[in-house]
Image: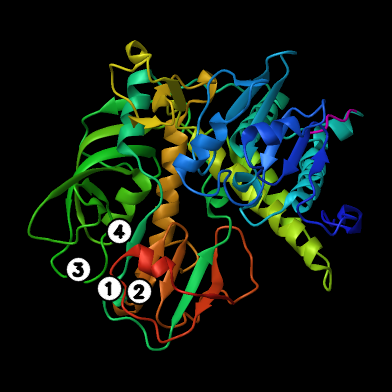
Amino acid sequence: MKTVDTEYHTSSDVSEKPERVNDAMFDVPRGTSAALLESLPGDVRRVYVTGVEPGGGGIVALRQWAQACGERWAPDGDQYVAVAQPRLTYRDVLTGRKVYVMRAAPWFGADAGPAVCAAAWSALEAALSAAWNFRGLRAGEWRPVKMFGTPATTGRLLLERQWAETGRVFEPVSAELRELIRTTSRQGRFELGPAADEGSAGGLWVYDAAFMYAACANELPTGPVRHDHGTTVPQYVRGRYRVDFRAPRSWAHIGLLGVTGERGMTYPVTSSEWHQTWADASEVQLALDYGWTVRPLERVLWETRSARPLDTWARRLVKVREEIDVPAGCSDELRAIGGAMRTAVRAMLVQTIGALTGAPRKVTRAVPLEDVAALPTGPVLEPTTVQGDQWVWTEAAPPTHDSMQHPEWAAHVWAKARTRLLADTHGAGALRVPPGELFALALDSIATTAPVPDWHGAGVDITGQFRLKQRVPGPVPACATLAEYYALAGEEA
């Protein structure tokens, strides 16, 4: 099956021309939000701004752009003004019509223009509809998939739809346990390796694990949970542990367990002192396998067999991604559409898993300068500042969708990804690289100063497995920060 085909070619060669898909429109930023809103057809409900962020760059410019909505339009409901993923709602004061304004970048990347975004949206809806209708096809029913405002919302609703097919319900753990897991879990590992101190005359080989989170979304913890202060680590039992740990005396590689401190996340390797942290069962077991001393102090265990809450959902997304097939010799436009679709599928996977933490929503508030009594008196997420003639701040609002609050699933996926980054089941991982050749680790990629012959070469794309993704020609200078590493100019392998 070829998800991308010639039918998705657009006829316009003007990339700045607005493009529509049903009630959604993709457009370039206008001078103000009022200029954008006043240009919309009457039946458009969602607008995705393509390219650079509205306002020309930076949070101050974006807030000014969002506030300049004119006399006919007024902000409506909860707003979140952020450069990466703004969520703006406006109401026509005369008709009551609502319009939602967001960026297309969280879906398709910052480089995709209106025509590419619209074509990718239509093609992706068709692909998701096919993947989520195999039961409907057998029953003679067809329920098309409609994509919603954000990748996370769309992914969550697809997950709920998949559960409904078999009548499955997964009750969240207690509020206290959810908060414990949220505050003690972290996402990917980002760290410079020992080789970054010296640089590399021969350049870098960057290996990337294809669609890593999809490979880690299987057999997540479900069922009754036990929270105790046991001191053992039962094998093959999903769980989280608060542990004291230290490295073996002979350890000469990077650290295995992360500790949050004043300098952010660090991975200590000393054997002369103890360190304490919360870690997933997969991380604890890896440390034990490599001879580290790990002493559990507190445990959260799921001892029953997993009911596999995300397995089918993740497999369907993998299938959609694999079937995005751009024919050889196709146009640059068609290649861009296929790339935008794959970016969107990854965004749905990653952002939905992140949303499972059930963290509070971020809401931007604004009041006139004279309305000092309305200023917040409690804690806020971002300090109150003056923007034009208003006070502006960001505060936390209660999360939505209580049934989807499962931080234990997000924490487990993130931890499995960190464990695979170090050592996976296919002979890859940072611990299989001599420390002197390890330049950087970044979420699902490993940069080395020499090729690793046993890992997949360029062009191989197997979900969850490392393959050569990029080459950075030498000489590569020493890097003191991750920002310097990210600034290196690489080439697709």
Report x, y in % for residue 276.
18, 45
Q: Is residue 12 visible?
A: yes
The residue pinned by badge 3 equals: 251
Secondary structure beneath disc 1?
helix
Q: Is residue 257 left or right of residue 368?
A: left
For residue 222, which numbered disc appears in the image? none
How crowded is the residue under tag 4: few (<14 C-alpha within 10 Å), some, or many (20+)? few
| Magenta range | 141-145
Residue drawn at 47 percent across, 22 percent down: 399
Inspect the image, locate mark 1, and give the three-letter code of the amino acid beneath it: Pro
The residue mark sitting in front, 3 or 1, is: 1
Q: Give the crowd class for mark 1: few <14, some 14-19, many >=20 residues within 10 Å.
A: some
Q: Which label's residue is closer to the chain start, 3 or 1?
A: 1
Q: Is residue 218 visible?
A: no
Q: Which sits earlier in the primary sequence, circle 4 or circle 1?
A: 1
Q: Residue at x 40, y 54 (%)?
A: 418
Q: What amino acid type is highlighted by mark number 4? A: Asp
Which residue in the structure is indicated by mark 2? 438
Mark 2 or mark 1: whose residue is earlier in sequence: 1
Residue contact at pointers 2 and 1, CB within 8 angstroms: yes
The amino acid beneath tag 2 is Leu
Q: Which of pointers 4 and 2 lies earlier in the amino acid sequence?
A: 4
Amino acid type at image mark 3: Trp
In the rendered image, the vertical position of residue 21 relative to residue 294, given as above or below = above
